[in-house]
Amino acid sequence: MDLEPPAPAPAGRSGRTTRTSTSGVTIRDVAAASGVSIATVSRCFNGGDRVLPQTLERVHAAARELGYTPSRTARGLVTGRTANIGVVLPDVTNPFFAPVLAAVESAAESQDRGVFIGDSREDPTAELRIAQRMASQADGILLVSSRLPDDAVRALAARVPVVLANRVVDGIDSAVIDVEPGLTAAVAHLAGLGHERVVYLGGPAGSWSDARKSDALSAAARATGLHLDVWGPHRPTFAAGRAVADRLVAEEVGAVVCYDDLVAFGVLSRCTELGVPVPEALSIVGCDDALDTGMARPALTTVAGPSAQMGRDAAELLLARMTTPTRDAERRVVRSRLVVRSSTGPATEPGDLDRLALP
Amino acid sequence: MDLEPPAPAPAGRSGRTTRTSTSGVTIRDVAAASGVSIATVSRCFNGGDRVLPQTLERVHAAARELGYTPSRTARGLVTGRTANIGVVLPDVTNPFFAPVLAAVESAAESQDRGVFIGDSREDPTAELRIAQRMASQADGILLVSSRLPDDAVRALAARVPVVLANRVVDGIDSAVIDVEPGLTAAVAHLAGLGHERVVYLGGPAGSWSDARKSDALSAAARATGLHLDVWGPHRPTFAAGRAVADRLVAEEVGAVVCYDDLVAFGVLSRCTELGVPVPEALSIVGCDDALDTGMARPALTTVAGPSAQMGRDAAELLLARMTTPTRDAERRVVRSRLVVRSSTGPATEPGDLDRLALP
DNA sequence: CCACCGTGCGGAAACGTTTACATGCTAGCG
DNA sequence: CGCTAGCATGTAAACGTTTCCGCACGGTGG
């Protein structure tokens, strides 16, 4: 690559200025240098089919010497495939997405594919715009926690292979975490600790996983005889958790399940500030087990979802759909589970609470 | 191969199968529909220069109706520009990089540019490979915490605009955090608490910021009369912190400064497990203030770097260099500062320590 | 010995744009 | 009234590939 790094008018017998960002040496140069036609050079770089071993060797040698790399752009123009994939998610900053992004990146890298990333800021309009931009430059798109309406997803999928992560739409591949086992266990756990009322701090409007969590909690609460209040929507952030914490303590809520760990941490943080002891006065359950969530004190009881596994599943599905567009839609499900740590504890009577508050 | 997989004969008056992932309608269709030449259509989509307002209107109407979007690939082929930028960083999973990625993504999005992302896994070879792949599809590349040798960076920069974040190489634009103020304050802080020996848990080999931190600590320790030991290299992970914690307690180290918050949390986590009280037995200082690091108990004293700002700076520099390749290299510096929370405290005599250990 | 076929390769036509250059037209100026 | 300047538009040549054909050649089967 560092053939002639700073040189002003580098290779090329014609002295034409090269403004492409690639090496500047084209398939024609290689053909000339190795005494074959460009068609043969092309074949040498695409499986080497129907090429004499010695020719292949000669061409590769010439290419190596000239520092030739096939232009992905030109290749893309004629083949219609770009060897890139796109990932669009609601917030790059949310640690929940990091493992899935990592998994996808890793899968792509192993096939020498580029990865586009887009941050929709939880805005469906932005999400669609980004996805459409990607559609022209990627062979497949992974929508993580998509906020798009079902129809929009299907419309997009008609133009370009689409796979969903953390979301389900009929007829579209998806990789999801089944929150039900974990949340059911969480409700049972809280009930077992004597809590009679639980508040669910809901996630962003239009979030599929929020709806799933809400449903799972309702069902579990009904089965257990627990009273469930659903608050929200809330943005899935630390700040949102802090903001809602005051109301939790004002209403003397004894147990709360949060849309995700960020919100849970926000609640925890604000409670600490307010001098509200956790879990004595308030039991907090998070979701996702993003970040190494065990590191906080008190360590957060949370519904852990194997998000890295979900990412790997999503990547597999995407790659599969890209190579075989005419498959039936497939759904991969990984199970969540409850991780009990120390942010949950026995229910307390209001009287006991007061005693705790002023030692 | 898969010339006409699902759709028999979709759109198009010619019935030609469209295998491109774009809308399938080309500039030619728009030209025909609006009764002008393709050159005029092209002009309408590039600033509308030298085009009669009514023509422009007509063309845009036709384009809208047909659902035409210019092929970025074809455009890229002839112009040599792709309107994409690339970001390569050592670990997508490390929360330190999230804000800078977000900043870059945001800047790119506002110019309707795509963002490639690559994860080098802290491996210089992989980093180079990824960067080279990007070079052919992006107009500029941001190397975050690059582990590449200076020469490799310069060689790359000769092929494609390159900007560095969290790293400095002569002749290359860079946006960095100046760790010196924060670390100097940290040393002073520890000295003020009576600590006489500090261990620095160094970061990954070949990390520029690790070298800077090490230097800054050495200078500050020398000036303060503190004894500084440098341990390492360590991978910048939670696990690495946990692993080294045992040695810290075995050697009865009283104060430790960590390469980043992940390592610091690892140390903290393991200490809690071992029953070593923080900060009574061990004062811990982190770096970066990544994650909302105040949420852990005890809250981590850390050297906060405004990484989002660094990201914005880097994005600005990259965009500027892409439009004006022949500028002098520029360096943007943001200052770190010490954030004192509760993971640091007064030095303890071994005797006192024992008393603490068994209550 | 002839017809045939597979094999290795070259020629040339795409792919969908941008852009230099040519062209016709209108208007302004002498 | 004629000449020219400028403006809107068209023509065509790139950009760097892949890939469909066709061609020569040599070996094999009849």
Image (cartoon, coloured by chain):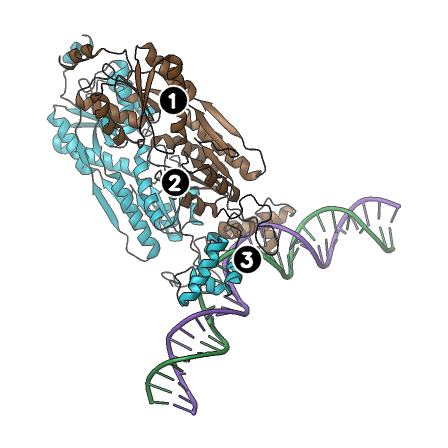
Chain colours: A cyan, B brown, C purple, D green
Q: Secondary structure at mark 2?
A: helix
Q: Chain of mark 1?
A: B
Residue A343, visible in the rendered structure:
no
**Residue neighbourhood size for the residue with mark 2, other residues' Cα within 10 Å, grouped as few (<14), some (14–19), many (≥20):** some
Judging by the rendered image, the residue that carries numbered circle 2 is B124
* Tag nearer the camera, 2 or 1: 2
**Marks 1 & 3 on one chain:** yes
Residue B305's image quarter? top left
**Closer to the N terminus: mark 3 or mark 2?**
3
Quick one: label 2 or label 1, which is nearer the N terminus? 2
Could you say whether the residue bearing mark 1 is in a helix, strand or loop? Answer: strand
Q: Is residue A280 above or below residue B142?
A: above
Kindly identify the amino acid type of the residue bearing the numbered disc 1: Ala
Chain bearing mark 2:
B
Residue, disc 1: B304
Residue D19 in the image, given as x and y percentages of width and height: 44, 65
Measured along the vertical axis of the image, is residue A217 above or below residue A276?
below
Looking at the image, which residue is at 24% across and 38% down? A212
**Residue drawn at (13%, 14%), measured in percent from left and top?**
B358
Report the residue marked by disc 3: B28
Give the camera-side residue of B143 and A13. A13
Can you see residue B108? yes
- In the depicted structure, whether residue B141 falls above or below residue A281: below
The CA span between labels 1 and 3 is 55 Å
